[in-house]
Image: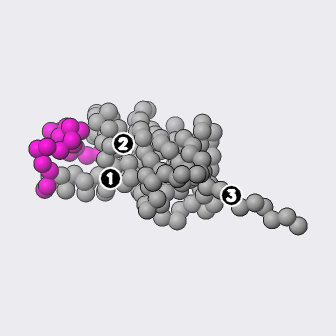
């Protein structure tokens, strides 16, 4: 279980939450010369639902109004389930939610969990959500992050 609202790891090492950040214009672009590292963030189901429920509901309403028969299989599955409340997906259809997060709303989830300018001294820019895992009321996202060069400490 994450301690506090969010547990963050870079290359299997716990780091402060302020070391990671997300910028919408940089998402998914990678970087040709900066190092890429694996990140993992874990939040409690309660924190996840409080942060993401509104975005999920907007997606569901949009699909109900504009969904098409040729939509992706996981969207069709959610539609067949009647777009249940997020809490029900977590409890009864975790695998469906994992797929939905990793394929469709990873960007939105990051945007909810990492508001713009929320990193005090960021060291890693989150670049992707490759996987979502749900276990024991904890949601874990993992993917690639870009290591941001640090300014050398001033010498006296």
Q: What is the crowding at mark 1: few (fewer than 14 residues within 10 Å), some, or many (at least 20)?
A: some
Query: What x and y, as percent, mark residue 74?
Result: 23, 38
Q: Are marks 2 and 1 in contact (CB under 8 Å)?
A: no
x and y percentages locating residue 16 in the rendered image: 62, 50
Judge the density around disc 2: few (<14), some (14-19), many (≥20) Cα neighbours within 10 Å.
many
Whether 46 is drawn above or below 26: the answer is above
Q: Which residue is mark 3?
A: 150
- Give the residues in magenta: 65-86
* Image-quadrant location for residue 95: top left
Q: CA distance from mark 2 to mark 1?
A: 16 Å
Give the labeled residue for mark 2.
102
- Is 47 located above or below residue 96 in the figure? below
Give the residue pinned by disc 1. 53
Write the residue at 41% across / 56% down: 112
Residue under the point 32% across and 43% down = 103
Q: Residue furthest left?
A: 69
Taking 150 as reference, is 21 left or right? left
């Amino acid at each position: 279980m994450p301690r506090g609202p969010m547990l963050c790891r870079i290359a299997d090492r716990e780091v402060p939450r302020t070391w990671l950040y997300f910028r919408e214009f940089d998402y998914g672009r990678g970087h040709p010369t900066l190092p890429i590292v694996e990140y993992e963030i874990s939040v409690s189901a309660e924190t996840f639902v409080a942060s993401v429920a509104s975005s999920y509901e907007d997606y569901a309403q949009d699909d109900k109004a504009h969904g098409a028969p040729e939509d992706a299989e996981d969207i069709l599955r959610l539609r067949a389930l009647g777009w249940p409340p997020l809490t029900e997906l977590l409890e009864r259809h975790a695998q469906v939610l994992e797929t939905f997060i990793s394929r469709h709303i990873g960007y939105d989830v990051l945007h909810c969990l990492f508001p713009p300018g929320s990193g005090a001294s960021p060291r890693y820019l989150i670049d992707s959500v490759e996987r979502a895992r749900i276990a024991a009321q904890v949601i874990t996202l993992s993917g690639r992050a870009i290591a941001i060069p640090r300014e050398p400490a001033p010498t006296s």
